[in-house]
Image: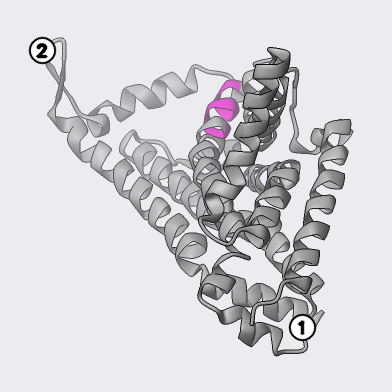
Amino acid sequence: MRTFKALVKREYWEHRGAMFITPTAMTVFFAALLILGLITSSNIEINGDDFSLLNKMPQLVEQIDNHSEEEVDKVVQLALYSPIVIFGFVMFWVGIFYAVGCLYDERKDRSILFWKSLPLSDTQTVLSKFFTVIVVIPVLYFCALLVFQIYSLIFGTVLLWFGGDSGLIVWSSSNLFVVAFNSLMGLIISNLWLAPLWGWLMFASAWAKKVAILWGTLPVLLVGIAEGTIFNSTEFLEMVGVHIARGGIVATASINNLEKDGYVLDMDLTSPFQAFAFSEFWIGLVVAAVFLAGAIYIRRNRDEA
């Protein structure tokens, strides 16, 4: 267990830019964007009248008082959940480039010779990288998201002060602990849903001798082209695309719960945990296990000397 923990730490420090600096920069950027929006609102004219958000806060507070608690709760919680879309999108691409490079890069820079000289099994090494993309990256992006969510609540509280309100309604309506928990689970379970994608990219990363990203994408495209040429069908590429898209639906299930959007890609999720009820989820884990076994086998038996 201690060895596995050390391997995960190694992955973090080797990819700290994508795992820590990127989500931190996103939080700072969006926080600054809120302040910039507040400042520039004073320069906006609507129907010839100057519009300043701070000056309009008393009217907004009155409008809030005219709405039911359920309506206010929905608006506040949607505002907190919404950033998961952009954080999850960036996290997805970080996961792709991490998975497709994690086993290839150590051969490219020859650091694999050092790691293979240590008493570390190939199984532990590959699984630590898989754990990183499945759990560590989502947790780090969630931490950045949570900071922004709390910042947004503080920002909203200050705005309500200018409207003569205590601002407590923002916090009482936020259901912050539930929102935070659902956000974390949404990011982790969506990455579990995408396990076959990560497994395939890691297999390609272990196999590739050059340009790992091409080995991760070209075989999929070639299978799709072959299917289209022989059978005049696009079912394979559609299956891959729909499965990946459904990962996004899992991540944003809590938003769907509030907006009641209904079925999207044959999924009507109100909680990320409902993904466990789909056979597609469990089949994906089995497929991922096969790809990971292949990656372990290649890493163990390839001569790097």
- Residue at image coords 42%, 43%: 157
Look at the image and say whether residue 233 sits in the magenta stretch.
no
Where does residue 135 sit, x and y in percent of width and height? 69, 58
Is 39 situated above or below 132?
Answer: above
Q: Which residues make up the magenta segment?
A: 71-77
Q: Is residue 1 left or right of residue 183?
A: right
- Residue at image coords 74%, 41%: 193
- Residue at image coords 65%, 46%: 187
Question: Splitting the image into 4 quarters, where does residue 152 fall?
Answer: top left
- Residue at image coords 58%, 52%: 95
Question: Do the numbered discs 2 and 1 sit on residues whose CB atoms are within 8 Å?
Answer: no
Q: Secondary structure at mark 2?
A: loop
Towards the viewer: 19 or 178? 19
Q: Which residue is mark 2?
A: 48
Q: Is residue 105 left or right of residue 52?
A: right
User: Is there any visible trace of residue 37 in the rendered image?
Assistant: yes
Where does residue 179 sit, x and y in percent of width and height? 64, 42
Q: Secondary structure at mark 1?
A: loop
Question: Splitting the image into 4 quarters, where does residue 126 fall?
Answer: bottom right
Outermost residue on the top side: it is: 47
Is 57 situated above or below 116?
Answer: above
Is 20 situated above or below 84?
Answer: below
Outermost residue on the left side: it is: 48
Towards the viewer: 266 or 77? 266
- SS majority, magenta: helix
Label 2: few (<14), some or many (≥20) within 10 Å?
Answer: few
Q: Which mark is residue 72?
A: none
Q: Which residue is mark 1?
A: 120
User: Is there any visible trace of residue 264 in the rendered image?
Assistant: no
Label 1: few (<14), some or many (≥20) within 10 Å?
Answer: few
